[in-house]
Image: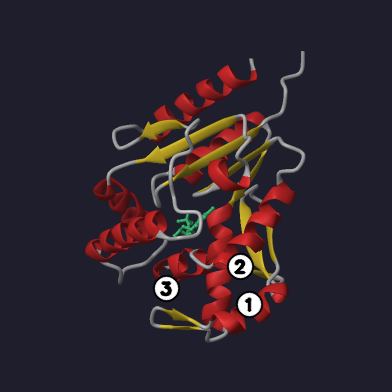
Amino acid sequence: MAQKRITIAIDGHSSCGKSTMAKALAKRIGYAYIDTGAMYRAVTLYCLDNGMIDGDKVNKQRLRRHMPKIEITFKVDDEGKSNTWLNGRNVEKDIRGMEVSSKVSLIAAIGFVRRAMVEQQQAMGRNKGIVMDGRDIGTVVFPDAEFKVFVTASAQVRAERRFKELQSKGDTTTTFDEVLANVVERDRIDSTRKESPLRQADDALLLDNSNLTIDEQNEWLYNEFLKKVK
Ligand code: DC
């Protein structure tokens, strides 16, 4: 009998390996994968490119007017990797840098930005068979998702992972302490913001992967998935 197709919501702290495990699961079970953090990052890049952010101030009036002009899509490249596109331009690399990382929490805290993103995310998941990762997927975007996971790891471990990733991408200027400070600051803003603060849904499974390898966490996720579709 064909397995039923479900909605999978993976939420958690920043840089805890959510995307890695969500992507691997989606590939293994033939589901679509959506990285909702990339959407908030793309809006942030748009704001930076258009001079809408000054220090920690966002020109919300201008941004609100520009929202209908911001088109975010995902396209799979020749290597099978999903890339984020913003208004016809591949921005996958630009949205992962420190400049966007240090401003994205400001943008993700704005109510009208969140409402626009959530609407698009709900449309993408309308037919189920989707793995979506973010902060509010199990609580706001798909509160009825059949399988919810909340992922975390210590701030030190998450900063180490993020630092390695930046270095592997050729960033030689960002220091470890800057990365750690960014992780801690994003946790604070994400968990204390008024709009959809980061929190574990009551029916989400908790995974602390501080001491797990990527393979171990992938196996854990796959086995929990199998229990849900049995
Ligand atoms: O997962 P990430 O680090 O790429 O997310 C970037 C930022 O976007 C992060 O500060 C939290 C925010 N975000 C959010 O508020 N809601 C989501 N569903 C996904 C990300």
Q: Which mark is residue 64?
A: 1
Would you place residue 56 above or below residue 227 in this image? below
- Residue 69 coordinates in the image, percent (x, y): 72, 76
Does label 3 point to a residue whose CB lies under 8 Å from ligand 1?
no
Q: Amino acid at mark 3?
A: Glu
Instruction: Tally the marks.
Output: 3
Mark 3 or mark 1: whose residue is earlier in sequence: 1
Of badges 3 and 1, the one in the foreground is 1
Q: Position of residue 85 (x, y in %)?
A: 66, 65
Q: What amino acid is at disc 2?
A: Phe
Image spot of residue 66 (x, y percent) = 67, 79
Q: Secondary structure at mark 1?
A: helix
Q: Residues within 10 Å of mark 1 (few under 14, many from 20)?
A: few
Q: Is mark 1 within 8 Å of ligand 1?
A: no
Secondary structure of the residue carrying tag 3 is helix
Q: Position of residue 119 (x, y in %)?
A: 69, 56
Q: Taking 57 as reference, is 188 above or below it? A: above
Disc number for residue 112: 2
